[in-house]
Image (cartoon, grey):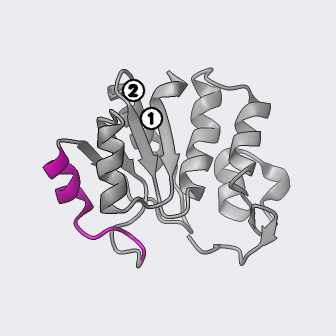
């Protein structure tokens, strides 16, 4: 199933078209629509391409269990689809998949962590969200660079 899941930061309209051409059938967006780097009218673009579009806006400074529960339900509902999940810089997505891949047995904890840490190493509320209590008092590390606590997301 993992081969039917792709992730990224915010795709452009042209990239959504390319995803459709690559047999993606469902787009899950974890970023709020009011983010300055979000794609305006993404839902309409997806509808025009015949893509299922699911929007689960996750506030970067307050990820909630209920957000993750909605994500799990969406992934379960589209388990046989080719799904592309995105946010703005792939941080929300990688943290959600860190949990999801382990809970579903798609990846071991070590492999899930390696995949997430290729994007970032969450601190603060995101460390708590993924269950890494050793980093709850730390700032996020993005691909080896320090950023402010709530980052550029």
* In the image: residue 44, left or right of residue 134: left
Which residue is depicted at the point 69% across and 46% down?
Answer: 116
Q: Is residue 44 left or right of residue 127?
A: left
Residue 125 picture location, percent across and down: 66, 61
Q: Mark yes or no: residue 55 visible.
A: no
Circle 1 SS class: helix
Span highlighted in magenta in the image? 37-49
Residue behind mark 2: 76
* Residue at point 56%, 45% (across, down): 96
Q: Is residue 135 left or right of residue 43?
A: right
Q: Quadrant of residue 12?
A: bottom left
Asked whether disc 1 touches disc 2, contact meaning CB atoms under 8 Å apart, the reply is yes
The residue depicted at 34 percent of the width and 26 percent of the height is 81
Q: Is residue 118 above or below residue 112?
A: below
Residue 72's tag is 1
Image disc number at residue 30: none
- Asked whether 119 or 62 is in front, the reply is 119
Mark 2 neighbour class, 10 Å CA radius: few under 14, some 14 to 19, many 20 or more: few
Numbered marks: total:
2
Residue 112 against residue 142 in the figure, above or below: above
Is residue 68 located in the magenta-colored stretch of the structure?
A: no
């Amino acid at each position: 199933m993992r081969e039917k899941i792709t992730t990224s930061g915010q795709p452009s309209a042209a990239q959504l078209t390319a995803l459709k051409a690559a047999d993606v059938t469902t787009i899950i967006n974890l970023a709020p629509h009011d983010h300055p780097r979000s794609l305006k009218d993404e839902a309409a673009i997806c509808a025009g391409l015949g893509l299922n579009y699911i929007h689960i806006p996750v506030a970067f400074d307050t990820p909630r269990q209920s957000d993750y529960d909605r994500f799990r339900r969406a992934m379960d509902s589209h388990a046989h689809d080719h799904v592309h999940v995105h946010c703005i810089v792939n941080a929300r997505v990688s943290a959600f998949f860190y949990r999801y891949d382990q809970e579903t047995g798609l990846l071991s904890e070590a492999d899930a962590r390696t995949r997430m840490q290729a994007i970032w190493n969450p601190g603060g509320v995101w460390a708590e969200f993924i269950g890494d209590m050793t980093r709850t008092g730390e700032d996020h590390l993005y691909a080896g660079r320090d950023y402010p606590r709530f980052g550029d997301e």
